[in-house]
């Protein structure tokens, strides 16, 4: 039964408040140590030999690094963190105004942790403007025919006429933009995309498609496929984790009760395919053996469960809070960086994309740290420390904060 699945890890310990504090303290110190190298430039999407190299603000992942800086500032209020993050806001403003590498759907991943966060925390007007421009860019990828936001690639080509599961995490930017501007167009598009995605990317067994294609003429759902998973029919671990968090957000924003049930079943599928220590292999096809793990998926799932717990009845909420605490305990004990000499990242054993005989992706960041893994690890710890005002996924903006 489904309860048994959630009880599978009954005896696993959950992270304690001391460890949560210790995890955030180390992360904040590690980020402070990194500012010299990563203020003018950004951390790359994945480490190489466990060390991040500096890159320009041109990838879909750069927002996570700025997001880590803001989370560290929220935790310890060191002025150097705030100064560095605001300098990066200038870079994000420049990037969206000059349309540098923004022809894709990851505007939320780029602009929520960097600029929406900056505006909420400090009232910075430039950050607000950049985030609204990013929301404009995101809705420019919306297709009326099919009612979805196109993930990648030039618009209106059959081979790119698709969404991917990750996009559910980009949509809070649109809800924030509607709230901030009073213009419902952003929210309306987000809502349509949510309903289309929830109907198509979740399979009958509650595993998930990474990517789903539509007929360009009719907008009818066509077929699912993987880009980064092991094979088309398998469940890519990070995709399933985006599904857990994405379902929580879908419910938060639409209030559709059926999304609670989908959330539980998508979570159950994930839990059923975890190894003993709860940290998934890079694809849920694998539950033991030598394949690399993807620790980032565990942090993403924990964040999604902590978000959903806010809307559930007490007993249910406690189940998911406990599971999130167990994910974080396993990450903290066995995966978190504890020694700066070992790595300039935060969490080891993540996988960006792994080549398989059945996928087309380039092998990259296999068994390394990666930026979203580090970011969501910090987000989950922050959520566990206090009932976090959920920076990224998003509550009303401050009207009374200091100007910066």
Image (spheres, helix red, strand yellow):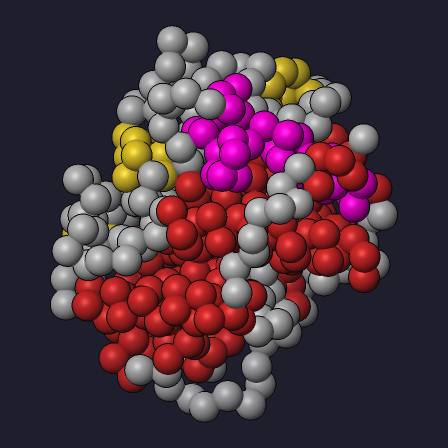
Give the answer, above or below, for where 230 lies relative to 98. above
Point out residue 66 in the picture as x, y percentages from the top left corner.
34, 63
Point out residue 159 in the picture as x, y percentages from the top left corner.
49, 18
Residue at position x 43%, y 25% from top? Answer: 228
Quarter of the image where the C terminus is located: bottom left
Residue at position x 52%, y 39% from top? Answer: 278
Decide if residue 247 is on the left or right side of residue 311.
left
Give the answer, above or below, for where 135 lies relative to 12. below
Point out residue 370 in the picture as x, y percentages from the top left corner.
33, 45
Residue 48 figure quarter:
top left
Quarter of the image where the N terminus is located: top right
The front one of 155 and 297 is 297
- Residue farthest along the front direction in this orientation: 11
User: Number of marks in the image?
Assistant: 0
Point out residue 21 in the picture as x, y percentages from the top left corner.
43, 71
The front one of 120 and 246 is 246
Residue 175 figure quarter:
bottom right
Residue 253 figure quarter:
bottom right
The front one of 56 and 74 is 74
Decide if residue 17 is on the left or right side of residue 178.
left
Is residue 228 among the parts visible in the rendering? yes
Residue at position x 31%, y 82% from top? Answer: 78
Inspect the magenta stretch and tell me whether residue 57 lies in it. Answer: no
Decide if residue 165 is on the left or right side of residue 255.
left
Inspect the magenta stretch and tell me whether residue 273 lies in it. Answer: yes
Extent of the magenta region: 259-287
Residue at position x 72%, y 22% from top? Answer: 205
Is residue 94 among the parts visible in the rendering? no
- Residue farthest along the top direction in this orientation: 357
């Amino acid at each position: 039964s489904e309860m048994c699945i959630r009880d599978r890890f009954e005896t696993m310990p959950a992270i304690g408040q001391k460890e949560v504090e210790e995890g955030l303290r180390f992360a904040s110190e590690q980020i402070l140590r990194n500012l010299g190298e990563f203020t003018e430039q950004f951390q790359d999407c994945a480490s190489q030999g466990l060390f991040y190299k500096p890159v320009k603000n041109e990838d879909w992942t750069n927002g996570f690094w700025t997001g880590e800086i803001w989370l560290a500032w929220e935790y310890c209020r060191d002025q150097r963190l705030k100064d560095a993050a605001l300098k990066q806001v200038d870079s994000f403003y420049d990037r969206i105004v000059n349309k540098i590498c923004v022809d894709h759907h990851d505007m939320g991943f780029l602009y929520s942790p960097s600029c929406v966060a900056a505006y909420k925390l400090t009232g910075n007007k430039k950050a607000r403007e950049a985030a609204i421009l990013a929301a404009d860019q995101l809705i420019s990828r919306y297709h009326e025919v099919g009612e979805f936001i196109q993930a990648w690639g030039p618009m209106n080509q059959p081979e790119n006429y698709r969404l991917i599961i990750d996009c559910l995490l980009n949509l809070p930017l649109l809800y924030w933009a509607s709230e901030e501007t009073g213009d419902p167009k952003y929210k309306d598009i987000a809502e349509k995309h949510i309903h289309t995605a929830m109907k198509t990317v979740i399979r009958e067994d509650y595993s998930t498609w990474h990517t789903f294609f539509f007929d360009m003429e009719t907008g009818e759902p066509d077929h699912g496929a993987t880009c980064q998973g092991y094979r088309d029919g398998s469940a890519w671990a990070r995709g399933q984790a985006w599904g857990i968090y994405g379902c929580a957000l879908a419910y938060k924003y639409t209030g559709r009760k059926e999304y609670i049930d989908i959330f539980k079943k998508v979570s159950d599928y994930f839990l059923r395919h975890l190894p003993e220590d709860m940290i998934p292999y890079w694809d849920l096809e694998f539950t033991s053996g030598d394949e690399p793990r993807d620790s980032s998926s565990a942090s993403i799932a924990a964040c999604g469960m902590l978000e959903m717990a806010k809307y559930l009845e007490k007993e249910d909420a406690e189940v998911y809070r406990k599971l999130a605490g167990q994910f974080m305990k396993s990450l903290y004990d066995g995966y978190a960086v504890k020694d700066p000499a070992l790595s300039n990242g935060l969490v080891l054993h993540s996988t960006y994309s792994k080549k398989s005989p059945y996928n087309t992706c380039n092998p990259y960041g296999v068994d390394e740290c990666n930026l979203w893994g580090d970011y969501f690890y910090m987000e989950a710890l922050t959520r566990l420390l206090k009932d976090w005002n959920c920076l990224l996924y998003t509550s009303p903006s401050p009207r009374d904060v200091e100007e910066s």
